[in-house]
Image (spheres, helix red, strand yellow):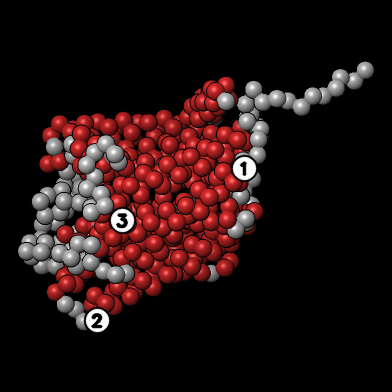
Amino acid sequence: MLIHIRHFIKDAFHSAIISGGRRYHIWMGSLVCVMAAGAVAYALQLRDGLGVTGMTDHVSWGLYISNFTFLVGLAAAAMMLVLPAYILHDVDFGRAVLMAEAVAVAALLMCLAFVVVDIGNPFGSWHLVPLIGHLNWPRSLLAWDVVVLNGYLALNLCIPFYIIYMKYTGRAPEKKKYLPWMYIAVMWAVSIHLVTAFLLAGLPARPFWNDALLGPRFLASAFTAGPAFVIVLLWIIKTHTRYPIADGAFAKLALITTVTAQINLVMLGSELFYKFYSPTHHGVNAQYLFFGLHGHAKLVPWIWTAIAMNVIATVTLMVHPLRSNPRSLMAACILLFVAIWIEKGMGLVVPGFLPSPLGELVEYTPSLIEITVCAGIWALGMFVLTMLVRIALPIELGEVRSPAVERPHVPIAA
């Protein structure tokens, strides 16, 4: 076994770092440059403290937690492929599911990175490590969030590794060894986004989040943005590699995205009716977000842009000829992804603080350091995702196998 693992590490390093054409190395080099810029910005934040960010006593969660909230949903979306591929035995998703799990791993690493940079002091992150720090579990919802995120990360690392490793060693993966964990992963995927929603909804002093619909809205938006991202990723893989992905996988994923995008819009409409038909003082945060308050309206253009993009993309997906056309499908998926990033990021987290429970309104603008750190973490996620895909593809295609695998004996002709 050790010899297989040694060869696996060597071949994985070759696939991810050494091999690849010019465009691949330019892409990876660009990501490393952005990661380096993010690291420098984070070093400045460590030196000078969180005062270099745009966060204040009034708005203590900004761009970092906004990205964290969105990416938890992206990670959970892997379930949309795992469920039909492994449990319902849908053959169209068979070759796409490992890519979705790679997306989940990259998204979870970004989530944990955003939590660490938001803490300010990295030594404080030890308190988030189960069994080492003091998590205040099960009382703290943040502790629950850390536990479910780390558990989901472990599941999405171990299950694909087992399947890929078995194929690398020329053996078929045994269902009895991975299928039970798949069932757990599907349920776990739902829990990670619900726990994050409960983390916000459980704060009665923040009426913008203290809403029973927040959990279902989180799921609907996650199952919209996640499949949209996976569609774009699969299309890039299909058009730039020899890896075959069935057209049926795109059609089914596009249909799933269409349905969840409509549900997401219905929930948005329901929330707007609830907030504005019979307005109360608890709707003041929504008033600030959608129409501005007392001359403060920094988020208004963002949220209406997000809604417009959401509607355009959903209508595009609802028209079958447009949904079947790769160009319009890709455009709609990118629009949806960006729209939900705005809506479930800055459009959800920041308005919860504005105005404060005391009526104070201090607007938030992310600093250049925050933006650079965020860009660095996104580059890290794309770097990890690219490496995982590069490692998985040649093994799935059967081009790379362990040299220690016994070859079938071929008799020499006389």
Q: Which numbered disc, 1 or 3, marks the residue that appears first in the sequence?
A: 1
Query: Whole-percent x and y of residue 272?
Result: 28, 74
* Lateral position of residue 241 relative to residue 140, left or right: right
Between the residue at mark 2 and the residue at mark 1, the CA separation in whole angstroms equals: 56 Å
Q: Can residue 50 be seen at all in this image of the molecule?
A: yes
Q: Amino acid at mark 1?
A: Glu
Q: Look at mark 3 in the image and give the residue it sits on.
A: 196
* Front in this rendered view, residue 400 or 402: 402
Q: In the rendered image of this protein, does residue 4 appear above or below residue 207?
A: above
Disc 2/disc 3 C-alpha distance (Å): 28 Å
Which residue in the protein does label 2 denote? 277
Neighbour tally class for label 3: few under 14, some 14-19, many 20 plus, Cα within 10 Å: many
State if disc 3 and disc 1 touch (CB < 8 Å): no
Q: Which mark is residue 174?
A: 1
Crowdedness of circle 1 by 10 Å Cα count: few (<14), some, many (20+)? few
Rendering coords of residue 273 (x, y %): 29, 78
Q: In the image, is 207 to the left or to the right of 344?
A: left
Disc 2 crowd rating (10 Å Cα; few below 14, some 14-19, many 20+) is few
Q: Is residue 338 in view from this perspective?
A: no
In this view, the mark in front (2 or 1) = 1
Q: Are marks 2 and 3 in contact (CB under 8 Å)?
A: no
Q: Secondary structure at mark 3?
A: helix
Q: Measuring 15% from the left and 41% from the top, which residue is drawn there?
A: 50
Specify the quadrant that holds the N terminus. top right
**Circle nearer the N terminus (2, 1):** 1
Q: Earlier in the sequence, mark 2 or mark 3?
A: 3
Residue 63 in the image: x percent, y percent?
24, 49
Give me the residue at 25% from left, 49% from top.
Answer: 137
User: Which residue is found at the position 54% from the left and 58% from the top?
Assistant: 253
- Image quadrant holding the C terminus, namely top right
The amino acid beneath tag 2 is Tyr
